[in-house]
Image (cartoon, rainbow, N blue to C red):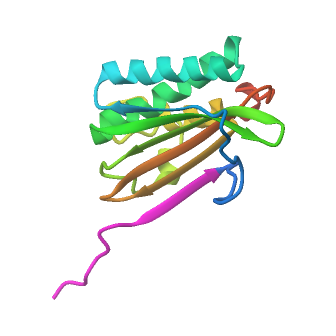
Amino acid sequence: MSRPRSISKKVWCCWNAVPAGEGAVPSEAETEVSVPVGSDADIIIARQQGRALAEKAGFSGSDLTLVATAISEVARNIVEHARRGEVVLRMIHQGDKRGISIVARDEGPGIDDISLAMQDGYSSGKGLGLGLPGARRLVDEFELESSVGVGTTVRMKKWLNSHRSVAKDR
């Protein structure tokens, strides 16, 4: 007789994350956009919508590129590993800080070993293994939750004028 095994293993990875229940409180001035993701064309749409929302929030120059690239990376993971999901983009305020929140969620196979998945060069598919760790370096806050057999949710925040440099995190 074999031993029962757990079908779903919930794992977390947080980096500069604000604990649940704390952080940005929605205000009337916030804007939210939800982009269904299931194809390469949807990745482009999510990227464009995120860039436009970040610009509306006050981002400019290279910060717009950082936001758009982070969105592209997590949206590409949805298409490659889960086939379908969504990216929810929202302007946020926390005290005197303004920024953008990016939540990418899917109901795909989930990630069994988040520590391994967050290492540069690791890929469970055909990619280069730079998507999730790369996205983490591009934003100010990054949180990843995944349950095997249930799906994955990535939450990211980029704050306006955060002076975050990609190089300082390497």
Q: Can see residue 170?
A: no
Where residue 15 appears, x then y in whole percent?
66, 49
Q: Toward the viewer: 104 or 113? A: 104
| Residue range of the region highlighted in magenta in the rendering | 1-14
User: Please, is residue 158 above or below residue 27 in the view?
Assistant: above
Where residue 164 appears, x then y in whole percent?
77, 29
Q: Residue at the spot x=55%, y=28% of the render?
A: 70
Q: Viewed as shown, does residue 147 lie left or right of 161?
A: left
Q: Viewed as shown, does residue 61 lie left or right of 116?
A: right
Q: Can see residue 42?
A: yes
For the stretch drawn in magenta, the main secondary structure is: loop
User: Please, is residue 101 above or below residue 117 in the view?
Assistant: above
Q: Residue at the spot x=74%, y=32% of the render?
A: 98
Count of numbered tags = 0
Q: Residue furthest left?
A: 1
Among the 4 quarters of the image, the one containing residue 3: bottom left
Among the 4 quarters of the image, the one containing residue 42: top left
Q: Residue furthest front?
A: 28
Q: Quadrant of the C terminus?
A: top right
Where residue 66 appears, x then y in whole percent?
62, 22
Give yes or no for residue 10 being in the magenta stretch.
yes
